Amino acid sequence: MKKKHKTNYRILALLMAFALFGGCTQAGNETPGDNGTPTGTASVTQSAVKTPEATATPTQTSTSTPTPTFTPTPTNTPTPVPELTITMAGDILLHTGVENDCLQADGTYDYSSIFANTKDFISSFDVALVNQEVIIGGSELGVSGYPRFNAGFELADALADAGFDVILHATNHALDKGKTGILNCLENWERFPDIDVLGIYLTEQDAEDQIVYIEKNGIRISILNFTYGTNGISVPSSMPWAVGPLLVNTPNAEGKEGAVKKITDLIDKAEANSDFTIVCPHWGSEYSTTQSANQREWNRIFYDHGADLVMGTHSHVVQPMVIVNNETTLNVLKYDFDRDQPKELRSDQMLVYYSLGNFVNWTEESGEKILKRMVGGMPEITLGLDDNGEVVIKDFNVRAVVTHVATGRNLVSVYKLEDYNEEMARENEIANRAGTELTIGYCKELLNSVWGDLWR
């Protein structure tokens, strides 16, 4: 059963309002006397007592009616209602074609064009996450594409400039450049103290504390990042904590209890210290637009330990959204949501995006099947309070994106599908590998089949 022990913000707001306005008295409007004692106080000092002199003769003086002064009554300023917006980009998959496009004449790399057409959208959210599929080991290790990826340090600059707050590095390619790749990547991220990095760790203590907590707008969220494995590359013996923890292929298989417990203990800890828990697993079967039995199994484990939102990656194509509760897991397509109205979930429900697909890629494979790898999505999540003061999802959908590729320099870029047109689609050079054009109609048909009318 999904455990809920969140802060009741509605009660907290009432207590704050009582403390602020319940203590307002006449003393708040008093004016200090010459000796610093307010004239309106109940205590009387000797200097305040006047004894009339016996010989004093009163003099007739004219008096005027004093003008009444207005003392404003304190007004109860409404306490802002907590609200937090969240998004996430799918796989940043830098194939050789993308790296060549970002290579500059002086030998450096400029990845900014990838995010140029989505930067404003990404930056508009309170919290933006991204699945950084490729290790950022720097040019000294050799910038490379599939099968052993590695990006230049400049990629971190582009991600930061695009507005991402949390970088998820727990992927099957985390060890493509071994221990040195991990060390270089983490050292490079130290240049960005305001960005949180998850999934790879420098020390055992870092690995034990691998939960990111972010508090904004009165809501505290926790984020965790796991990967199913590292393509068979062994974790360095001197750094067994470097990546992970790893999702075991069969959670309920004999001998796997320890790995499952490590993950569930982390979720329990995150739940105990936040109002809303997000799990970002790197899982599933590549190029499948449907979730696997393994994903469904882990999904239930996440729910049973209190997770509120799951946003998955790795399949490189979009996969369904589901809503989980105590009894069932139901495809979002089965719900009768009004497209134009907020879609609020209950506190006992968990929302799952099984896969967001690729954010950017230029696959080196061929055939019409690769077209679906050019289409991805970015969730649009709004958190707020339900009637009981619990932090819940107040609304959700997903924004469709498409990768545009062309030969040249800084021509590879990701667009929101709504900003992409047929002329641009005809110029997308993925057609050279797919053997057929990528069309807007194809993208919409794919998205409709997986997400119905909940994508934008």
Image: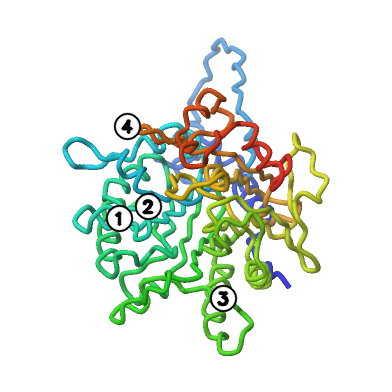
Comes first in the chain, label 3 or label 4: 3
SS label for mark 1: helix
Which residue is at a point 44% across and 65% down the rendered structure image?
172
Point out the image quarter for the C terminus: top right
* Residue annotated with mark 2: 195
Picture coordinates of residue 224, whole percent (x, y): 50, 64
Badge 1 or badge 3: first in the primary sequence: 1
Q: Amino acid at mark 1?
A: Trp
The amino acid on which the numbered mark 4 sits, given as a three-letter code, is Gly
Q: What amino acid does circle 2 point to?
A: Ile
- Give the side of residue 212 with respect to residue 193, left or right: right
Q: Which mark is residue 291?
A: none
Is the Cβ of the residue at disc 1 closer than 8 Å to that at disc 3? Answer: no
**Pointer 1: what residue?**
189
Q: Secondary structure at mark 2?
A: loop
Question: How packed is label 2: few (under 14 Cα within 10 Å), some, or many (20 or more)?
Answer: some
Residue 206 position (above or below residue 368): below
Say if residue 49 shows up in the picture.
Answer: yes
Q: Could you say which disc has been placed on residue 249 in the image?
A: 3
Residue 393 relative to residue 415: left or right: right
Q: Quadrant of residue 209?
A: bottom left
Q: Residues within 10 Å of mark 3 (few under 14, many from 20)?
A: some
